[in-house]
Image (spheres, grey):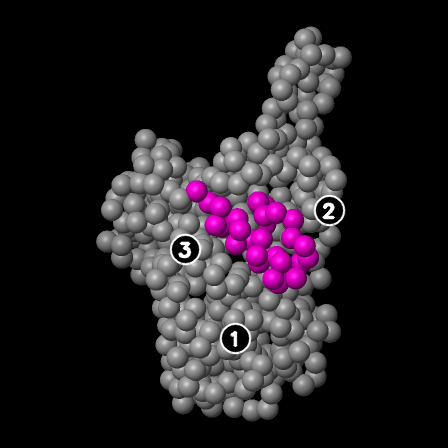
Amino acid sequence: MTDRLIILGATGDLNARYLLPALAALRAAGHLADRFELTCADRQDWTGEEFRRWASAQLDQHAPTEPGEIRKAIADSARYRQADATDAADIASLVAGDGPVAVYLALPPAIFPGTVAALDSANLPPGSRIVLEKPFGEDLDSAVELNRLLTGVVPEQAVFRVDHFLAMTTVQNVLGSRLANRVLEPIWNSAHISEVEIVWDETLALEGRAGYYDGVGALKDMVQNHLLQVLCLVAMEPPLSLGERDLRDRKIDVLRSVRPLTDDDVVHRTRRARYLAGRVGERDVPAYAEEDGVDPRRRTETFAEVELELESWRWSGTTFRLRSGKALGHDRKEVAVRFRPVPHLPFGFNEEATPNVLRFGLEPESMTLALTGIGAGAHDLTPLTLAAQPPPPELPAYGRLLLDVLHGNAALSIRGDEAEEAWRVLAPVMSAWSRDLVPLAEYPAGSDGPASVGGS
């Protein structure tokens, strides 16, 4: 286990909201040794005491359920260093010491290449690991180049391209439910499933993230990584094991099976939009183009939807719809597996049977199965719902990911070829959208999203 963690970009939102709370959860669960060293670095000209006060305030806000002494221990143990993540001398000073180190790039993706180049010059100790947040590159070419740089510094097995969706309990339940239950796996195919929706609709608007989001948009921020990863777990063939090689081989098989989209497909199978001013719940939300830090000329989308088909024996004929939107009227974060109707109902029933839907709620975590049963009358059909609540996880998603990083378990990390294949899947969409083949629609904040589908 690696006992040294360096977080670059340590005064940012990622560290405040997720990494520091994850470390507190790891410490509370007894996963961090007494010798564990946490070094936090950023360009801010702060003293160590100033950073620790900031870290303490962030832990109080974002990890309120962890014991006070645990939060204090994490804040007090953090060492702060002012450093430029792209400066080789600064990086060399940070990584110097005994034993391997895990370096977490909690940084804007645009400076990943410069930071990796600095790490290359820093002579990382043997056994060190590099951790990156999505998106991995900005397109296929930049992803290929970033992978080339990374594997010139450490072996591929030591590169952790993390996606916290893969560590969410219900995302893991998608795989467990279908592979560990005799009742599901025999019908987990296109003969029985007509459509799979993977949705991350949120009431949250931009919330001060223009510096990152306006250069990325919903397609790259959510669909290209998070939702495609969930698609892989839904559609993959059963792996021989849950080890990193078997699991990741089966995931990339799914991405390779996605039927390439033509321009005409993009027009009719995708849609994009951004929100106008409106009201979400009890708050007024300005139009996206008027948010602080947004450049309207970029025409960044806040809503993206893509329909995909898989060219495989198991899934030929099933539609996979991936969608994400901001500033919508309701949160809807789930995987919805829609089964085909029964082929025949005996004469005498008064209603049609409603097709079954299996839903995996991602946030909050839940699982429901919509069935049809007998109603008040002997021949009346009525909808029935079976609901289950997964047990609470021992660790939050980022806690699970950090633990895997420290132990060197890359099963939930995204392999280099997988990251490239995900860009290949959406390259036709990015190209067609850049040429305005699909118009940028608009929807009021607080609504259900854009009304029109694709270019129709």
Q: Earlier in the sequence, mark 3 or mark 1?
A: 1
Q: Say which residue label 2 marks.
A: 180
Q: Is residue 185 above or below residue 172?
A: above
Q: Residues within 10 Å of mark 1 (few under 14, many from 20)?
A: few
Across and down, in percent, residue 107 comes to 43, 71
Q: Residues within 10 Å of mark 2 (few under 14, many from 20)?
A: few
Say if mark 3 contacts mark 1, CB within 8 Å. no
Across and down, in percent, residue 292 comes to 32, 59
Residue type at tag 3:
Trp
* Magenta extent: 233-259
Mark number, residue 143 = none
Q: Nearer the viewer, residue 148 or 91?
A: 148
C-alpha span from label 1 to label 2: 33 Å
Q: Residue 386: say if magenta.
A: no
Q: Say which residue label 1 marks.
A: 155
Residue type at tag 2:
Ala
Across and down, in percent, residue 114 comes to 37, 76
Say if mark 3 contacts mark 2, CB within 8 Å. no
Quarter where residue 439 is shown: top left
Mark number, residue 423 = 3
Residue type at tag 1:
Pro
The answer to whether any part of residue 339 appears in the image is: no
Q: Earlier in the sequence, mark 3 or mark 2?
A: 2
| Circle 2: element type | loop
Q: Is residue 397 above or below residue 150?
A: above
Q: Residue at x 47, y 61 (%)?
A: 417
Q: Is residue 64 left or right of residue 151?
A: right
Q: Is residue 58 left or right of residue 345?
A: left
